[in-house]
Image (spheres, rainbow, N blue to C red):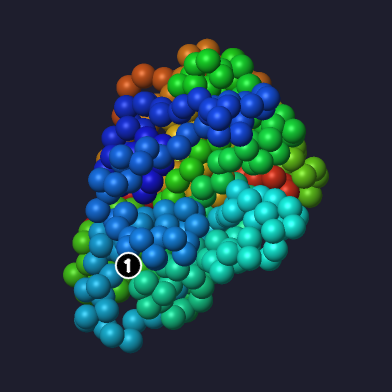
Amino acid sequence: LAAPVGAGWRTVWAQVLAGRPNFGRLSEADGYSGLPCRVAGLIPEAELSGWPSWQFDKRNRAEMSRASALALAAAREAAQGADLAGMRRRSPDSLIGVAIGCGMDGLETAVDAGVGLRSGRGYAEVGPHFLTKLLNNMPAGRVAIEFGATGPCLAPNSACASGADAIGAAFRLVRDGIVDAALCGGTEACVGPLAVAAFSRVRALATRFNDNPLAASRPFDADRCGFVMSEGAGVLVLEALDSALARGAPAPIAEVLGYGAACDAHHLTAPKLGGDSGARRCMLAALREAGNHSAAWQRPLALQVGHVNAHATSTPIGDSAEWLAIESLLSGVDASVIQPGCLVASCKGALGHLIGAAGAVEAALTALSCQTGRVPPTANLARPDLPTASESLRLVPDGPPADWPTNPADGRRVALSNSFGFGGVNASLCIASYLP
């Protein structure tokens, strides 16, 4: 994992668990003059240089975009943790797939090349690696090359749901026996004047905290006014449980039980409200898939969710719409799938919005919550502002992490991790603690 709070999964987890954001003010000298939002979350270079996975020779690094480099470093960390090299030694013919989502790769590279080309200086202004820094499937391709992954190589591009959709796609590849394992997740490094200007034009970014960057991202809070753009990457290794146990792999952190996706088919940038929203339908689809297809569950909808990692980006309409969607699962025939006192929290108070990497990094953090029984606080959430009150849902505010006990019925912790995006896309992953 890599995010503004640090590089390496242990660092990111510790900082998010402590509710410590790391946002900074964007400088006029870097082209941000006149923009209404001057806050972003960038990974400190000192963090990257101290990350063992961030090792590139000068030429190799010059050939790839920052998003590709982040994806590759995160994949190295994940592969080492899962001992993919051991899998290859034991079964040289193992088929590995890749699914790495990305939102907007190489945007500033395109801007610079376009300015140079239009200035009349000639097409040499378009460098030989321009195209491989621009295409959104290059992070996935880089990862596949490094690990000799000759199975399907997918690159979902579904805005802020890209990382979650990539994990969902990989989950089905592994579950259906198409690959033996998959490297999956998301990456993003699109913070730049053009991207900030574009998101500002649709009034998506925080604009009232330019002089107090650390307080700018505040999901569910009464003072929220938009999200904070951030960069980062998250990559997981998914493998069938019987395969991992047979080869003596390290104990799994958690299990992916289901994946659901649904479209609002309503508006390009605004979420749909009401019981028929894509947000609600994707959560229900993930739960139904978990109930129907996981060997751990014998009855459809027999599981109960004790934690929802909310997409909640800190926008007034988006956070409210998601709360209503979660609450609607409590009504009618869906009520049994939510544990009383279900913990709802958003990592984006600490991380900002990682765009295409958000769903992947947050799925990893949700898996760690399932494993440890600790749910990170929603940083900067001081005055909750919710459209409705619910006795069955418990919002985790700024402060210490919340304790999350196992469900007495089955000894597990089950969570949903949500990711929604422009275009009306909605994705949800059902993740559970691993029971030996």
Q: Which of these two is toward me, 175 or 33?
A: 33
- Count the marks: 1
Type of residue at label 1?
Answer: Leu
Q: Residue furthest right?
A: 266
Residue drawn 66% across and 41% down? 194
Q: Which of these two is toward me, 336 or 142?
A: 142
Instruction: Please provide percent x and percent y for residue 325.
Output: 64, 36
Q: Which of these two is toward me, 19 or 265?
A: 19
Height in image: 258 above or below 269? below
Residue drawn 63% across and 21% down? 207
Q: Residues within 10 Å of mark 1 (few under 14, many from 20)?
A: some
Element under label 1? helix
Height in image: 160 above or below 314? below
Instruction: Please provide percent x and percent y for residue 350.
Output: 43, 30
Can residue 424 be seen by looking at this rendering? yes
Residue drawn 58% across and 27% down? 28
Q: Residue furthest bottom?
A: 93
Q: Residue furthest left?
A: 248
Q: Which of these two is toward me, 169 or 403?
A: 169
Instruction: Please provide percent x and percent y for residue 80.
Output: 25, 62
Q: Quadrant of residue 183?
A: bottom left
Instruction: Please provide percent x and percent y for residue 306.
Output: 43, 38
Q: Quadrant of the C terminus?
A: bottom left
Can residue 418 be seen by looking at this rendering? no
Using residue 298 as the reference point, say whether residue 78 is left or right of it: left
Residue drawn 32% across and 67% down? 241
Q: Residue furthest top?
A: 383
Residue under circle 1? 241
